[in-house]
Amino acid sequence: MTFETRLFGVLRWVTIVILAIATLFPFYYMVLLSVRSQDSLLQHPGDILPKLSDFTVTTYTTVLKSVASGGDGLLELLGNSALVALGTVIVTLALSLPGAYAASRLRFAGRKQVHFLFLAVYLFPSILLAIPLFVIFSKAGLRDSLVGLLVVYVAQALPVSIYMLRNYLSTIPESIEEAAAIDGNGRLGTLWRVTLPLAAPSIVATGLYVFMIAWNEFLFALLFLVEDRSKWTVSLGLSQLAGGLEVPKTVLMAGSVVLTIPIVILFFAAERLLAEGLTSGAEKG
Amino acid sequence: MTSAHTVRNRPAPAEPPGRPPRRRALTLRQQESRAGLALLSPTLIIVLVVVVLPVVWTIVLAFQRLRLATLQREGIFGRFTLQNFAKVLGSADMWSSLGTTLVYTIGGTVLSLALGLVAALALRKPFRGRAFLRSAMLLPYVSPVVAATFVWEIMLSPQFGVVNAWGKSFFGWDKPVAFLSQETSTISLFGWHVHLPLALLVVIAFEGWRYFPFTFLFLIARLQAVPKELEEAALVDGVTPTQRFRHILLPQLYPVLALLSVLRFILTFNKFDDVYLLTGGGAGTDVLSVRVYDFLTAQFDIGGAAAQALVLAVVLVVFLVIYLKFFAPEDRA
């Protein structure tokens, strides 16, 4: 073994450890602070090991309890977020599945232009969209409604969704569909009975990704919903909470944990699918 | 419409003789084209209504004197003026903001690519716990931006942040560093005083931390697809790790690296929430998108905000054109 080979053997492990700490420590710190009291944080800001004597869950009860009973009301906002995110997933999938099928299987006039359009939408600055949508929604009285927000999220998620589904559908051999067609299925029958079940993993991954887009979104929620507290999503509610000077940081961390947990659970349940869904097609460069 | 995709490129069967054709039957190709557009049309309509039309309207708005308060009275097509652009382009703040945006974008792009590449190389070979680490490393990317920025804010806080607490007890910092609200920090190196744009660097670091999982994901997928024979042959020839990286892996990675650079550049250039949540655009981090937001919500100057947003979009379109001209993968259609 040359010196260089050994050096890189060591460096590799050093890198792995540093990366692991850099990515995991902030989340560990988030959870740690969320179960401490504000006093113990102020007295020992450098402590990063849990102490049982400090342990408290009042941060969580404070942040989740309704405003009427003296809390910060995040539980109600969780409902809003779930509603918008699930709605976005359902509508996006319903619209993008036929679209992705068309994009992967059928040749039609304007196909190239459609690809370009979707790429452009994906890369477009959302702040640019925010202005006209803000004006239109203000005029139409849709500005503080969850439906308005859902429409925006669907439009943003559609291009990514079509891209992911299309890549996957292209890997399903057309001959399977042809066989089904010969057995007497129409195009819709083939799509429903053969293609969709085969594409199930990709549909799950895409749905998951769309859920994340909608659950994590902040800008449009801020622009559209900020005036009506009962409509806030968790992200918005939490950021508004941070504006208040009286809120202890440990309560903010409890709120952050509550905001992050649904995503982490979904993500670890379907991580492999998601990674493949996003990168399939990238291999060819 | 049935099974049009099974037979392609064949002309429609000739009309049976004797009966006058009522209407020319569509060729299978035409049928397929219609079906394709029909299946895509719901998506296209949504994208047109919620994305394309608003963008066109932004262009119209940018040429009007419009404030939110007067909007209800005035119609969509008011008087046109170049005043907004004169105001936006004539302001020194806007040019310094463009500079900040570029530094932030290039810094964030390079950092996320470099970290992603290092991570992909380090996690390439299997080891115990790799599967777990691989998913754990995606956490910064998938976690909600509000939660991620909060943790950073608290970690970096001068009063109770762990970074300052450790800096003071382990590195002998004499006073806490206000990472997110200090515009410049002067450090002395061998008698030289170097001014660092502190808050901007922190925001760039955040960008690198949050988005390296994205580049990591694509790079490790590509690394996994490098043909084994290539590396085995090189191994027999006794190449060192650096040579293997430079001459075998890197050429394989070029296309995806180019694609990722453009993607990350454009997405970072547009970024609003990360910077807004970390610094609110203060302390030398006033990127363009945050300026647009300020125009819109602090001054309710819709025309000004639209003009500002258009400047941002024009710069981007230039990059998109460059990308499509030089890097776009061949359409597999």
Image: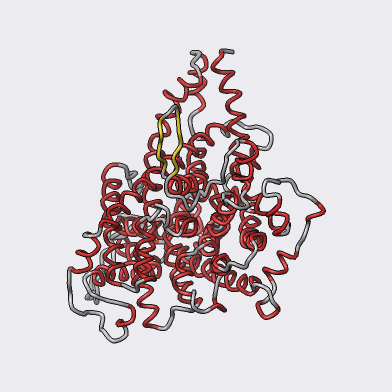
Q: Is residue A180 above or below residue B50?
A: above
Asked if one can make out residue A194 in the rendered structure from this viewpoint, the answer is no
Q: Is residue A150 visible?
A: yes
Describe residue B193's horizontal placement relative to residue A29 as left or right: left
Q: Nearer the viewer, residue B122 or A61?
A: A61
Residue B208 x, y percent position in the rendering: 48, 44
Model colouring: secondary structure
Residue A122 picture location, percent across and down: 39, 57
Q: Nearer the viewer, residue B223 or A55?
A: A55
Residue B327 appears at what percent x and percent y?
A: 31, 42
- Count the numbered circles shown: 0
Q: Quadrant of the N terminus of chain A?
A: top right
Identity of the residue drawn at 33% across and 78% down = B68
In the rendered image, the residue lying farthest to the bottom is B73
What residue is rendered at 49% in x and 51% in y? B180
Which picture quadrant has residue B41? bottom left
Residue drawn 51% across the image and 41% down it? B216
Q: Position of residue B211 (x, y in %)?
A: 49, 47
| Horizontal relation, residue B98 to residue A268: left or right | left
The quadrant the C terminus of chain A occupies is top left
B42, B250: nearer the viewer:
B250
Q: Is residue A18 above or below residue B265?
A: above
